């Protein structure tokens, strides 16, 4: 129960932090923040804006940055 209480408290804190960050950001330079950006209990791999590099998609990155050098 203690961990559930900490998760709930962090959700409230993360919401306030996202609100403050969004009020003070420049909309032309940065994206809008979400509470999950500040919550330590949310795994970072579940964020849709984060791309995890794996063996399957490394060839796409090589083509994008190096090109086809055949």
Image: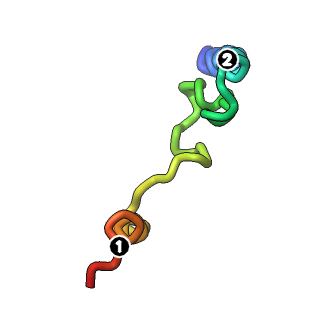
Q: Characterize the local packing of mark 1: few (<14), some (14-19) or many (20 or more) Cα atoms within 10 angstroms.
A: few
Q: Position of residue 37 (x, y in %)?
A: 59, 30
> In the image shown, does 12 or 66 lie closer to the viewer?
66
| Count of residue discs | 2
Q: Residue at x 38, y 71 (%)?
A: 63
Q: Is residue 18 visible?
A: yes
Q: Is residue 13 above or below residue 37?
A: above
Residue lying farthest to the bottom in this orientation: 70
Look at 58% across and 45% down and name the residue there: 46
Q: Secondary structure at mark 2?
A: loop
Instruction: Specify whether residue 1 is in view.
Output: no
Q: Which mark is residue 53?
A: none
Foreground of the two, 32 or 56: 32
The quadrant of the rendering that contains the C terminus is bottom left
For marks 2 and 1, give the CA distance: 39 Å
Residue depicted at 52% across the width and 39% down the height:
44
Specify which label sits upstream in the sequence, 2 or 1: 2
* Vertical placement of residue 28 versus 60, above or below: above
Q: In the image, is residue 11 above or below residue 46? A: above
The single residue placed furthest to the left in the displayed view is: 70
Name the residue carrying label 2. 24
Q: Is residue 35 left or right of residue 68?
A: right
User: Do the numbered discs 2 and 1 sit on residues whose CB atoms are within 8 Å?
Assistant: no
Element type at marker 1?
A: loop
- Reading the image, the residue beneath label 1 is 67
User: Label 2: few (<14), some or many (≥20) within 10 Å?
Assistant: few
Q: Quadrant of the N terminus?
A: top right
């Amino acid at each position: 129960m203690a961990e559930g209480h900490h998760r709930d408290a962090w959700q409230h804190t993360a919401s306030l932090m996202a609100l403050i960050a969004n009020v003070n950001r420049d909309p032309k330079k940065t994206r809008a923040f979400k509470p999950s950006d500040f919550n330590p209990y949310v795994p970072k791999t579940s964020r849709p804006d984060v791309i995890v590099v794996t063996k399957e998609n490394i060839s796409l990155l090589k083509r994008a940055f190096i090109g086809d050098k055949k």
